[in-house]
């Protein structure tokens, strides 16, 4: 896509808007769908990709992304209110830290995540949140007539592709954080259970040349495993890929088991997965559970929103620190240190007792 560059150098920012009173803040919250829709529109249009390092007018950007200039100016004005782009006094728009995250080429890009969280099906289930709160179960099947993942793969192929890209991006970004955090002293074999495409495992194997590892996930998931782990890949000689449902059993022996972002089902599924790990592991093996927490103050607006979306689409839930400690303890794990992985993930260091 063409990147707009102009000769304008006047970048005096518009003065910030004062903090609104409670009544106006509630009005803003009620109109939250407009904010989400604006982010989605900017991402789909590629506005952030078109805007270069030099501020540009809405007319210049409209030519680059093939839209009408006045509606685009209105979209950019709305986004600038929330710090996504900034509007200068001369009418040009410039990047902010947040708008850069909508670029496809940004190493920390949230473009696919932004699209995933605003997919068409989300607009149909959010209005049913009161029903989910009443029943305690998901409403997705009531709305679409089938389970969430069945719907994605059978009826919403484009949405499924967005989901896959979003999960891949998120996993690749957090994998480096996990690899930086974990001490693998004394570890010869790592098992990434429910590890998706294996980005965490690949990052660990790259960092620790003497370690080998196993990736386990459902057949349809591992079919898209990280190319570094597959036959012919740079890490294939130290990697094994196993298809299976971790709730049904884990045929993997390891010194360290990693469980990341999969304990979000119903309690019975969570118990079965944790018991399967303990059954597979030798006494003294490490188990590191990595999850988002809904009571993690710096990221609560994000994690509590994900928690409600899980309720709507699969009947799942994010954990509080205590609820996860309770489930790990009930499963029989000895819990040690709890450490932040990054601003929105925590690692629970556990050991399989003797």
Image (cartoon, rainbow, N blue to C red):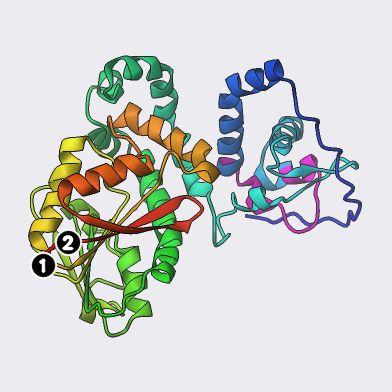
Q: Is mark 1 on a helix, strand or loop?
A: loop
Q: Which of marks 2 and 1 is nearer the N terminus?
A: 1
Pointer 1 residue: 282
Residue 323: x %, y % from top left: 31, 39
Left or right of 306: which side holds 145?
left
Residue nearest the observer in this picture, 305 or 34: 305
Left or right of 278: which side holds 187?
right
Question: Residue 200 has which mark?
Answer: none
Residue 124 is at least partly visible in this image: yes
Disc 2 versus disc 1: distance between alpha carbons? 7 Å
Confirm or deny contact between disc 2 and disc 1 (CB under 8 A): yes
Position of residue 12 relative to residue 29, above or below, is: below
Region of the chain picked out in magenta, as a range? 44-61
Question: Residue 352 has which mark?
Answer: 2
Residue 7: x %, y % from top left: 88, 57
Q: What element carries label 2?
A: loop
Residue nearest the observer in this picture, 159 or 229: 229
Residue 114 is at least partly visible in this image: no
On-image quarter of the C terminus: bottom left
Q: Assess disc 1: are there few (<14), some (14-19) or many (≥20) residues with their C-alpha within 10 Å of its C-alpha.
A: some
Left or right of 117: which side holds 23?
right
On-image quarter of the N terminus: bottom right
């Amino acid at each position: 896509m063409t990147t707009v560059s102009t000769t304008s150098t006047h970048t005096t920012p518009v003065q910030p808007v004062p903090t609104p009173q409670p009544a106006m803040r509630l009005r803003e919250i009620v109109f939250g769908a407009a904010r989400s829709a604006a982010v989605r529109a900017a991402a789909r249009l590629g506005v952030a990709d078109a805007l270069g390092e030099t501020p540009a007018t809405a007319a210049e950007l409209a030519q680059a992304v093939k839209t009408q200039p006045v509606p685009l100016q209105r979209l950019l004005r709305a986004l600038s209110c929330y710090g996504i782009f900034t509007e200068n006094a001369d009418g040009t728009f410039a990047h902010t830290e947040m708008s850069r995250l909508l670029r496809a080429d940004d190493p920390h890009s949230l473009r696919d995540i932004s699209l995933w969280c605003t997919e068409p099906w989300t607009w149909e289930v959010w209005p049913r949140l009161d029903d989910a709160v009443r029943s305690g179960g998901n409403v997705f099947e009531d709305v679409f007539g089938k389970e969430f993942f069945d719907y994605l793969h059978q009826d919403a192929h484009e949405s499924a592709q967005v989901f896959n890209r979003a999960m891949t991006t998120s996993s690749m970004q957090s994998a480096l954080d996990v690899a930086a955090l974990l001490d693998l002293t004394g570890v010869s074999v790592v098992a990434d259970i429910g590890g998706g495409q294996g980005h965490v495992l690949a990052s660990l194997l790259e960092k620790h040349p003497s370690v080998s590892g196993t990736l386990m996930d459902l057949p349809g998931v591992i079919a898209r495993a990280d190319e570094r782990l597959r036959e012919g890949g740079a890490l294939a000689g130290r990697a094994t890929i196993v298809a299976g449902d971790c709730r049904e059993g884990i045929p993997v022996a390891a010194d360290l088991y990693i469980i990341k972002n999969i304990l979000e089902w119903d309690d019975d599924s969570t118990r079965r997965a944790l018991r399967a790990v303990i059954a597979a592991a030798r006494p003294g093996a490490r188990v590191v559970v990595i999850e988002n927490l809904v009571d993690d103050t710096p990221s609560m607006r994000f994690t509590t929103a994900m928690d409600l979306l899980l309720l709507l689409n699969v009947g799942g839930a994010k954990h509080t620190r205590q609820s996860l400690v309770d489930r790990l303890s009930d499963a029989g794990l000895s819990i040690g240190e709890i450490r932040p992985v990054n601003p929105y993930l925590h690692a629970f260091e556990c050991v399989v007792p003797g």
